[in-house]
Amino acid sequence: MDRVANFANKVEYPYLMIIGEKDTIVDNSAARDWHQKTASKSKEIKLMAGSYHELSKEPNNSVLFESILKFTVKQLNESTNTFGALNIKDLRFSK
């Protein structure tokens, strides 16, 4: 874990970090600290309210999937290697 923390400033790639509010496996304060130290110009952190560690198995997992899709669309649309634009409004979510 020390190595991960020590090299946070080397992270320059885009990323989305989603953490569960009630996660007892990942230290949310350490995750937030790492997020602040990274050098990425395109980074996001999202806290899933009332969620634990396995976010995809939570009752509100649509928040997880929608966040991932929105971040991915944003990255695709901002990419210099575009192959077409994708509008988040064109996506439909269902359970």
Image: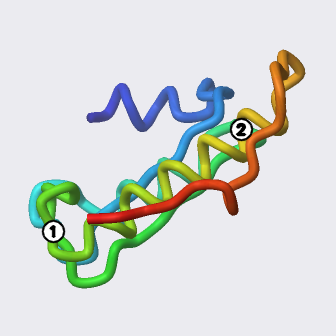
Is 3 situated above or below 88?
A: above
Which scheme is used to colour this image of the protein?
A: rainbow
Query: Is 45 on the left-hand or right-hand side of 87?
Result: left
Task: Give the crowd class for mark 1: few <14, some 14-19, many >=20 residues within 10 Å.
Answer: some
Disc 1 residue type? Glu
Q: Residue 87 location, x and y as percent?
A: 75, 51
Quadrant assignment, res 85 = top right
Disc 2 residue type? Gln
Task: Give the residue pinned by disc 2.
Answer: 75
- Residue pictured at 81% horizontal, 19% vertical: 83
Query: Is 68 on the left-hand or right-hand side of 85?
Result: left
Question: As rendered, which of 73 and 54 lies closer to the eye?
Answer: 73
Is 89 situated above or below 51?
A: above
Q: Residue 68 location, x and y as percent?
A: 48, 50
- Residue pictured at 26% horizontal, 65% vertical: 95
SS class, disc 2: helix
Question: As rendered, which of 37 and 24 lies closer to the eye?
Answer: 24
Task: Give the residue pinned by disc 1.
Answer: 58
Query: Is 9 on the left-hand or right-hand side of 17?
Result: right
The quarter of the rendered structure image containing the N terminus is: top left
Earlier along the polypeptide chain: callout 2 or callout 1?
1
- Residue pictured at 20% horizontal, 55% vertical: 56
Q: Residue 9 location, x and y as percent?
A: 62, 33
Q: Label 2 vs label 1: CA separation?
A: 26 Å
Query: Is 94 on the left-hand or right-hand side of 71?
Result: left
SS class, disc 1: loop
Task: Give the crowd class for mark 2: few <14, some 14-19, many >=20 residues within 10 Å.
Answer: some
